[in-house]
Amino acid sequence: MPAYIETFNQILSLGTIFLQIIVLIIVINLIFFRTKENPILISFKKYTFYLGFIIALGGVALSLFYSQVIGFPPCELCWIERIFIYPQAILFGMELYKRDQTMVDFSIALAIFGSFVSLYHIYIEHGGSSSLACAVGGSASVSCATLYVYEFTYVTIPVMALTVSVFILSLLINYKYISKK
């Protein structure tokens, strides 16, 4: 494994932790300081679609980088997580182009389902049992329990996918709340 991969994993893991802190800031403001005049919530609403597009596109690019450039083969659950993240880049891109906010509910649904798949994948990684073939790594599949990235004692690829989904979900929930009249 080339030396740059360890540095790349650490930088990406720090980015994941940064996104988790941003999610925490949004959630705390939505729970404890929920007013339509909250400057933090208003700022995130203003940049919802730009941030969502950048994060979703980053998720697409990085998942492809890990599998196509570095050579980490995706397991069955990784493919399912990708199914819920990849359309997000298209939806946010369309939103930036058309400006009609019709994609918000679709994107929320994708983020919720993607979060559940990521949570289940994290459960499998930490020794949980599963009836899926990939949980044990059969001859034709990659084990869902394989840890290709393991930084700061908890950041793995499914944690990164969960962070992307929850970040998008928190952005869109904030957007819907602030947009209500």
Image: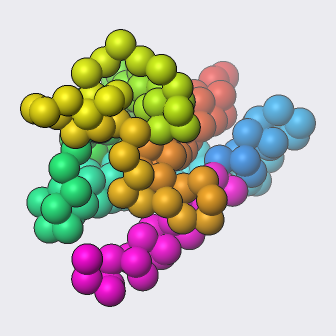
The residue positioned 80% from the left and 43% from the top of the image is 29
**Residue 136's spot in the image, x, y percent?**
32, 30
**Residue 85's spot in the image, x, y percent?**
31, 38
Q: How is the image coloured?
A: rainbow
In the picture, measured across the screen, residue 52 lies left or right of residue 73, that is right
Residue 79 lies in what quarter of the image? top left
Quarter of the picture holding the C terminus: top right
Residue 108 lies in what quarter of the image? top left
In the picture, measured across the screen, residue 105 lies left or right of residue 85, that is right
Is the residue 165 above or below the residue 70 in the image?
Answer: above
- Decide which of 169, 113 is in the foreground and name it: 113
Is the residue 2 above or below the residue 78 in the image?
Answer: below
Res. 38 visible in picture: yes
Q: Residue furthest top?
A: 131
In the picture, measured across the screen, residue 160 lies left or right of residue 36, that is left
Res. 112 visible in picture: no
Residue 175 lies in what quarter of the image? top right
Q: Is residue 2 magenta?
A: yes
The residue positioned 74% from the left and 51% from the top of the image is 25
Quarter of the picture holding the N terminus: bottom left
Q: Is residue 131 magenta?
A: no
The residue positioned 48% from the left and 20% from the top of the image is 129
Is the residue 134 above or below the residue 126 in the image?
Answer: above
Q: Residue furthest right?
A: 32
**Residue 2's spot in the image, x, y percent?**
25, 83
**Residue 24's spot in the image, x, y percent?**
72, 47
Count of picture labels:
0
Q: Main secondary structure of the magenta part?
A: helix
The residue positioned 41% from the left and 18% from the top of the image is 130
Report the span colored magenta: 1-22
In the picture, measured across the screen, residue 143 lies left or right of residue 15, that is left
- Decide which of 56, 92 is in the foreground and name it: 56
